[in-house]
Each structure stands twice: as structure tokens, then as C-alpha cells.
Amino acid sequence: MIETELAIVGAGPAGLSAAIEARRAGAEVLLIDENSRPGGQLFKQIHKFFGSRSHKAGTRGMNIGTELLRESKELGIQTWLNGEVCGIEEGHKLWVVRDRSRSEIVKAKKIILSTGATENAVPFPGWELPGVMGAGAAQTMINVNRVLPGKKVIMLGSGNVGVIVAYQLLQAGAEVVAILEAAPKLGGYGVHTAKVSRAGVPFYVSHTIKQAFGTDHVEAVEIVKLDDSFKKVPGTERTLEVDTVCLATGLTPLTELAWLAGCKFCYVPVLGGHLPIHDDKMHSTQPDIFIAGDISGIEEASTAMEEGKLAGINAACELGYIAPEEAEVRSREIWDSLNSLRSGYFGQKRRDSKVSILQKSEELISYFKAMII
């Protein structure tokens, strides 16, 4: 058995930020990630971030990832790559399969779960054909592996992921035949949508994919118009020749470890579904387990980094490396930053949802205290 003060599962923007804050305070940190390189989504993001300078505005995601890796190396954070955490028990023990060849048990005084999210799929006849993939998978292929997934692409979903990846596919040399959106209006930020529109890509609102055709790969799709109830309108079908279908249809938090640990959950559709309840320190309802990033609700990478800092600071505080007063001041500063990131129409809905989660956390904590008394 391997023992450490703080184990962090997931080395994406949230996990790296948490590890850096905790290690900088003096805590012993073990960072575990199932991938062959740390950084999570950051190294796929070649576009520049928005927000203020403190939120890395004007900096490309891949450069932010490089900076976080540099800091983690300088601090000497122990990192296990190709390490899949398969189980958690007794609140403190992690079962880890390393390099697909051996298993380890890690016992930690504190645990931060920053496991990220997975892409949602949309089933339709032909969706199992090669060439149908998540938009994030296509982004990994072009920006990380330098492989073009196809020559003629259709994107389902007009949110930020859909339009950003569509533009990056154009930059990589693909033709984006169309972007479909089931809702009656487009979902992405105007600056991203405008770039794709100026490149000549047509948008179809109130449309979806009815079916895909092909033998051993996608050769065409049939699209169809949707009515106000999101039902297919007969007679509106049309066929488009494509060899790749990208699905930018949302993300679902990866919460399996939190379920196994016995964390209490609540359902928040706007943030991705069932989420572990947490307090304003990112502490879950389970003793010694914190969460950060997309596992606490689907948002931007900049938000994930702030939540990671919050979890790292408060985990280090509970370990005795940061005075409670200092942790309180720093946490308040981070919350000010998070509220700033969640400003605007889309951010307001997420901020309201986070407030709801915090209220549920306070209700549960009061309940548990009453039970103890």
C-alpha cells in the first residue's frame, strides 16, 4: 500500500491547479491520470480564452496547459500517468491500475476528484458507422494527433464546442458541410459563430440528423426539420454527402468514483445531470473528499482551474498547511473570480445552479449535525 497526504484523480485543468496550490502550501501530493500525458482538454484548445487577464484571456489553452505542467514539475509533484482509478473504498483508499499491468492501493488523508466529463452521444440509424464521433474526439485528432478525421464533415450542435471545433476543422483542411442545431436558435458565443459563418458554413436551426448512410463508413446523412416540440417534420428531409459526423451534443460529468465513495448527489440539468453536492470549499458530503472541475458541473476550463485552486487550498488547510483564516481569505477571492466568470446570460444560469447546490450542501450539513447531536 502506498500512502500520501493528498491524492488527486484527474490531471486536467482542475486537477493540475489543485495539485499546484496544495503542493505550494507544502502538502505531499500524488496526481493520478489515466492518459499518457497530463493536461486534459487544455492541449486540444488552440483557441484563445475569454474573460479578464486574471482568467488567462488572450492565452491559448495549450499554452496554459504548458504553464501548468511547468509549475507542477518545478514543485516536484508526483504524477502517475496511465493510471486508472477503478475503485474507492472506506473514503480514503483508491484502487489504481497502472500501465494496464499492475495494481496499487493508495491510501490518502484527503482526496480530490477532478475526473472531468464524457461526451454525450445521439443515437440514430447508422450512428454506429465509422466516421461518427464526438466533436471532442475530432478535436483531439486534429490538434493533438495531427490526423484529419474526414474531408466532408457535418456538425450536430451549435454550442461553443460545436462552432469552435468546426472552425478548427476548417483550419485543418476539412470542409464543414453544415452545422445543425435542434433548438430554434444557435447556442454558441457570437464571436465563435461569426467566424464559422464568415467562412461560408451554413447553419440549420430546428434540424437534426435522421439517419446516416454507408457501407463500411459514413457516406451521407439525411437531415430533417424539427417542430416546436422537437418532433421530426415529415417531408422536410434532405440528404447531404459527408464522410464524418461530429456530435457536439453536450457533456456528462464523470461521477462514478463519487457514487462509489457514497457522496450525496443532486440533479441539475443545466450543469450536466447528477452532481455530487459540495460546499463553498468544494468539499463533498463525504469526509475528506473534495471535487473540482466538470465533475461539479459542466463549465469552461477557466472555471475548472478556479475550482481546482479552491479545492487544493482547502484540502491543504485541512491537512494543516494553511491557516484557516488565510484559506478563508483566499477562498473568498477565488469565489469573486468564479462569480465574474459566471457573469452574463449563460453564466448567470450556472451561477444560480451553483448557489442551489451550495444551499443543498448546507441543508445536508445541518441535517448531519442534528443527527450527531
Image: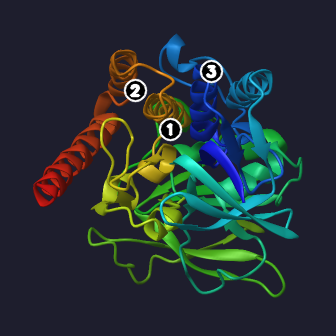
Residue contact at pointers 1 and 3, CB within 8 angstroms: no
Q: Is residue 183 visible?
A: no
Spatial separation of the CA atoms under disc 1 and disc 2: 9 Å
Q: Quadrant of residue 317?
A: top left
Can you identify the residue that label 1 sits on? 300
**Amino acid of disc 3:** Arg
Dot 3: what SS? helix
Within 10 Å of disc 2 (Cα), the crowding (few <14, some 14-19, many 20+) is many
Tell whether label 2 touches label 1 (CB within 8 Å). Answer: yes
Query: Which residue in the protein does label 3 denote?
Result: 24
| Residue type beneath disc 1 | Glu
Earlier in the chain: of badge 1 and badge 3, it is 3
Please tell me how crowded label 3 is: few (under 14), some (14-19), or many (20+) other residues with Cα within 10 Å.
Answer: some
From this view, report whether residue 58 is shown above or below residue 265. above
Which residue is drawn at the image coordinates 80% and 43% (left, top)?
Answer: 143
Instruction: Report the residue marked by disc 2.
Output: 341
Residue sitting nearer the eye, 170 or 348: 348
Lower position in the chain sequence, tag 3 or tag 2: 3
